[in-house]
Amino acid sequence: MSTQAFHDTVLTPASVMVSKASDVLGVELAMSALGVADRRTLMRWRSGAPIRAVRARMRLQAVFLIISELEQSLTPVQIPAWFTTPNPAFGYRTALDMLIEESLDTVVPTILETASR
């Protein structure tokens, strides 16, 4: 993981991170990656509404950081496919599956390591 990507994650407003996630991944994939069930919630966050749940903020920062890492080596068209393609590094699961099914503390370092290769 690059120091700049981490720095950007800390300083970037949540609304900008949500916009980036939904622009790069598409709204439906961004909702899944961010653990958001209601499209209106995503749109409120994108408009600047506060993200009150600490866990949701952490997930947003993780997804933003993963996207930032992937942008170093993939095109915008390739990034959504990377999230949804089974990966041998993940036991042939997808990064999205791992984000949904596992603890962020456990999977984010693994996903970031794979994303930065």
Image (tube, rainbow, N blue to C red):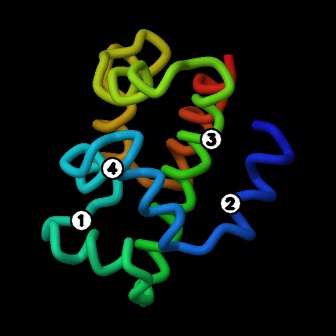
Q: Which mark is residue 9?
A: 2
How many numbered discs sit on the rendered protein? 4
Vertical relation: 18 (above or below) 70: below
Rounded to the nearest angstrom, the CA distance separating label 2 from label 3 is 9 Å
Give the SS element for disc 1: loop
Q: Residues within 10 Å of mark 2 (few under 14, many from 20)?
A: some
Q: Which residue is mark 4?
A: 33
Give the SS element for disc 4: helix
Q: Which residue is mark 1?
A: 36
Q: Which label's residue is closer to the chain start, 4 or 3?
A: 4
Q: Which residue is at a point 76% across and 37% down the rendered structure image? A: 1
Say which amino acid is labelled 2.
Thr
Image spot of residue 39 (x, y percent): 16, 67
Rounded to the nearest angstrom, the CA distance separating label 2 from label 4 is 16 Å
Image spot of residue 43 (x, y percent): 27, 72
Say which amino acid is labelled 1.
Val
